[in-house]
Amino acid sequence: DDKKAATEQKSIEVLAAPERVFLPLSMHIGAPCQPLVHVGDTVGLGQKSADSESPVSCPVHASVSGKVAAIEAYPHPNGSLSQTVVIENDFQDTLHESVRAHGSAESLSGEEITAIIHEAGIVGLGGATFPTHVKISSGLSKVDTLIINGAECEPYITSDFRIMMESPEEIIGGVRALM
């Protein structure tokens, strides 16, 4: 019994954005990021708010537009304290000017796609939140088979299943970009 019956038929719901967003600067297995914003700054949705020079790190981006209210230590989901950028949501969802399309995957090289993935801060969903660009760059021009793992190994979890059911075109687009 995988305990998935409670949610496997429930559609994904979009939650309302909170009044305050907390962005830990340790969001992956790599070195913590350093803030690129300051208390009092106005930030746009998608704005790079922190970054690290460490090769196994990814930048952190604002998930709302608004004003930076604090940069200080807060409890992290892993139980530690982490420097955190706190943003007061203005509920305008004003996109930062750096958020833009890069062209079709077919028009970009593997290196360009890998750089875009790094700059976007994409990491794995496992416990280590390993940066995706590191995984991809280690296989550029070496891979002849791509396996897309949609298996959910934990009881109750159905998020991968629902994404496959509701957004298969986005999954195929990601597969094409990786190919």
Image (cartoon, helix red, strand yellow):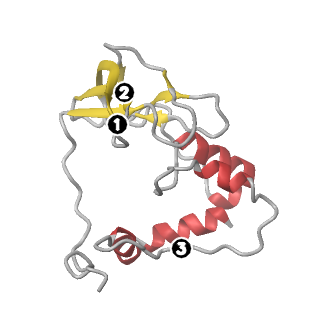
Q: Is residue 158 above or below residue 134?
A: below
Where is residue 46 drawn, in percent x and y?
42, 37
Residue where numbered disc 2 is placed: 84
Q: Residue at x 72, y 52 (%)?
A: 137
Tell me whether circle 1 and circle 2 mark residues in contact (CB < 8 Å).
yes
Quadrant (top left/top right/bottom left/bottom right) for the C terminus? bottom right
Q: State the image coordinates of residue 16 (x, y, percent, origin top left).
A: 18, 48
Where residue 6 sits: x, y (%)?
19, 77
Task: Answer with mark 3 or mark 2, whichever residue precedes in sequence.
Answer: 2
Closer to viewer: mark 1 or mark 2: 1
In this picture, residue 125 sits left or right of residue 40: right
In this figure, which residue is indicated by the disc labeled 1?
76
Q: Amino acid at mark 2?
A: Thr
Q: Residue at x 32, y 72 (%)?
A: 158
When asked about the image quadrant of residue 88, the answer is: top left
x and y, in percent, of residue 127 in the image? 46, 53
